[in-house]
Amino acid sequence: MALNVGCTAPPGRARENRTGSWRVFLPRFDHEACSKCGMCQLICPEGCISETADREFVPDYDYCKGCGLCAEECPKHAITMVQEEK
Amino acid sequence: MALEIMEGSIAIAQAVRRCRPKVVAAYPITPQTHIVESLAEIVANDELDADYITVESEFSALSACVGAVASGARAYSATTSQGLALMFEVCFNMAGMRLPIVMTIANRAMGAPLSIWNDQQDSISLRDAGWLQFYAENNQEAVDLHYIGYRVAEDHRVLLPVMVCFDGFILSHTYEPVDMLGQEEVDDYLPPFVPKYRLDAAAPVSMGMYATPDYYLEFRYENDLAQKRAIDVVREAGQEFGERFGRDYSALIESYRMEDAETAIVAMGSICGTTKDAIDEMRSEGKKVGLVRIRCFRPFPAEDLRAALGHVSRIAVLDKNVSLGAGGTTARGAVGLEVRDALYGSSIPVLDYIIALGGRDVRIDDIKDVVAACEAGDGDRFFGLRTEVL
């Protein structure tokens, strides 16, 4: 990405900052234990959890910062934070 | 040329009117007040087609200017001392977003202790914010530097904000003869502002977006490059000003009686007028003394100073600011530090004198005392301390 004077950018360029690299702990989803309540999608401050056609909630690891809020809030304890090997 | 006798602040306001800013946002503070009062009248009397935004603080004043310049309008503000300190964050944003503006600083001391009187600590303390900084010796130069300031700031090789600094009270409240250019002359010299990017709902952009560690260093490097490019742009704009109007500002420094000088004084601002008189007296007494006046402190004219000072035996720097704690057990101001840096590797002693802080008057005899001290190798200290109150 070439620099623009004054860090001026058209809308949408923040997407190029893939914040997933900031992550230390990674949320692992247990789809068997999931009750499909959607709390993880609501609570995610990055808005990076989406629901698939098969009704599975999955994070986008390109942007997930590993904050752990989804794991904290999940009523079924179906999300576990595991240290990530890089 | 038609000379008019005017108060410095009123002359600045009249110069700003001729620069046709679309937005003026300022908060009154002594000794800047007469500038913005006068501009308020000018706008109210329809002598300038501008939005005058009355704000509740200097932080808001400069923030309003950020928005105005981002939208493509020429803007103006003025402040001093504590007001400039309140703008600290916005100053860095303005330079980082590469938004050109001219802001007048009526230089004043920083509190505490509270002082409304002149020194240059306020603007000097923002030397690393990315702004260009010009220091005027007299009101004519202060006026002219506003025209030059907009020309340089808005040049696409630069795109940086400019502080035009002139000494509070000593210049701002003093009546001097000033040649005010006509509107047509200013219009010919200073074309309308053409922004490189602007806020436009039809083609939206974000400015000053956050930069991750992968990019931030490069943005700061580009800011520094723009400062360096400004050296030539200042020269060009100053030379063209001289060709059109007879006052040449192509040099970033001014040398006064330096040809065979053994002792050189280096200083900025109105103190240089007194210094020139002192030099004339010392010259008539047979002392080979000269002055190098720094008009442009940012970008810093290091090469010019090396060329101007290379032949002297000693240098006395008059600093109307102090970098508290600098210099180990000796005292230093910003100008002394930078002159010493520019001359690194030479054997010419550079001695710093912290002088005239908080409005302390400096007279011809004081300058002579500085020169005598410098000749004796006695410097890097506060000058004129009243030891009886310590």
Image (spheres, rainbow, N blue to C red):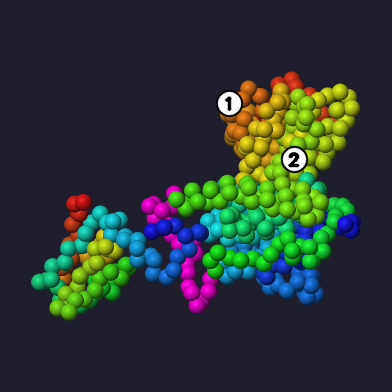
B46 up-or-down from B264: above or below = below
Taking the spot 68% from the left edge, 70% from the top edge, the residue there is B22
Count of labels in the image: 2
B202 displayed left or right of A86: right
Q: Specify few, some or many for label 2: CA neighbours under 10 Å numbering under 14, 14-19, or 20 or more.
A: some
Taking the spot 10% from the left edge, 71% from the top edge, the residue there is A32
Residue B142 is situated, as x and y percent measured from the top left of the image, at 76, 52
Residue at image mark 1: B345
Quadrant of the image containing the C terminus of chain B: top right
Residue B304 is situated, as x and y percent measured from the top left of the image, at 66, 37
* Marks 1 & 2 on one chain: yes
User: Does the segment drawn in magenta span residue B200?
Assistant: yes
> Magenta residues: mostly which secondary structure?
loop
Residue B316 is situated, as x and y percent measured from the top left of the image, at 72, 30
Classify residue B329 by image quadrant: top right
Farthest front residue? B243
B269 displayed left or right of B75: right
User: Does the segment drawn in magenta span residue B207?
Assistant: yes
Residue at image mark 2: B254
Q: For the residues marked 1 and 2, what is the alpha-carbon distance in whole angstroms?
A: 23 Å
Amino acid beneath label 2 = Glu
Image mark for residue B48: none
First to last magenta residue range: B199-217
Residue B191 is situated, as x and y percent measured from the top left of the image, at 69, 64
Quadrant of the image containing the N terminus of chain B: bottom right
Q: Mark 1 belongs to which subunit?
A: B
* Residue A85 visible within the image: yes
Sequence-wise first label, 1 or 2: 2
Question: Helix or strand or loop: what does disc 1 sit on?
Answer: loop
